[in-house]
Amino acid sequence: MERTLVLIKPDGIQRGLTGEIISRLERTGLKIIAMKMIQMDESLAKRHYSIHQGKPFFVGLIKYITSCPIVAVVLEGRKAVEVARKVMGSTDSAAAPAGTIRGDLGIDMGRNLVHGSDAPASAEKEIGLFFNPGELYNYSRDIDKWITESAG
Ligand code: DAT
Ligand code: MG
């Protein structure tokens, strides 16, 4: 099963939207297999966003993401990366469709509330930055057969 890393970013924490954001992702049927609150230091932030190093928004991005504790969540399920990003909406909250987390709850690119991995390979890499293998739980849910046909 595919996995993705979601971060509730500092603005999500500050605005009291942690539960709302997790709820929107959880009700898709994706399964939470790990979750923790953590304040990212500069080193972790730079590793997590290494692909954006050198871009004009990089310094501000690192300052923002390290400014307050965040909540890191690993979600598992069919097409987890694509499903989570669909629920999150596009990067610029002002352009994100209504019905998405960013579209409904935000108006800014640099305050877009939530991170979601962009591909299965980057998800595995990002999950490894935030969680030890032992922190990822392997369990089944009775309801899984009603969420994914192949599960039952
Ligand atoms: P996403 O978070 O949708 O995967 P991304 O990986 O391209 O988007 O960028 C990472 C974060 O950096 C994004 O959530 C917000 C910030 N960002 C991206 N482009 C930006 C820009 N042009 N101005 C300000 N912040 C930007
Ligand atoms: Mg990205």
Image: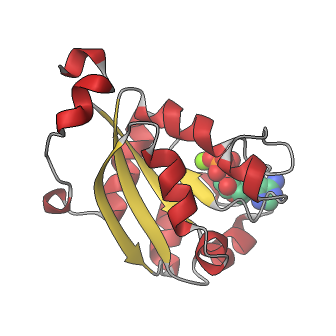
In the image, what residue occupies the spot 71% across and 73% down?
Answer: 59
State how many labels appear: 0
Q: Nearer the viewer, residue 93 or 150?
A: 150
Instruction: Look at the picture and state if 136 lies above or below 96.
Output: below
Indicate left or right for 12 with 46 as reference: right
In the image, what residue occupies the spot 85% across and 43% down?
Answer: 95
Instruction: Look at the picture and state if 150 lies above or below 142.
Output: above
Q: Nearer the viewer, residue 26 or 119?
A: 26
Q: Quadrant of the N terminus?
A: top left
Percent x, y for residue 39?
Answer: 46, 81
Indicate left or right for 89 with 95 as reference: left
In the image, what residue occupies the spot 69% across and 41% down?
Answer: 89
Q: Nearer the viewer, residue 75 or 19?
A: 19
Indicate left or right for 117 with 4 as reference: right
The structure's colour scheme is secondary structure
Q: Quadrant of residue 16?
A: bottom right
Percent x, y for residue 74?
Answer: 35, 52
Percent x, y for residue 71?
Answer: 45, 69
Indicate left or right for 30 with 10 as reference: left
In the image, what residue occupies the spot 13% across and 60% down?
Answer: 134
Q: Quadrant of the C terminus?
A: top left
Percent x, y for residue 84?
Answer: 51, 40
Q: Is residue 49 visible?
A: no
Q: Is residue 10 visible?
A: yes
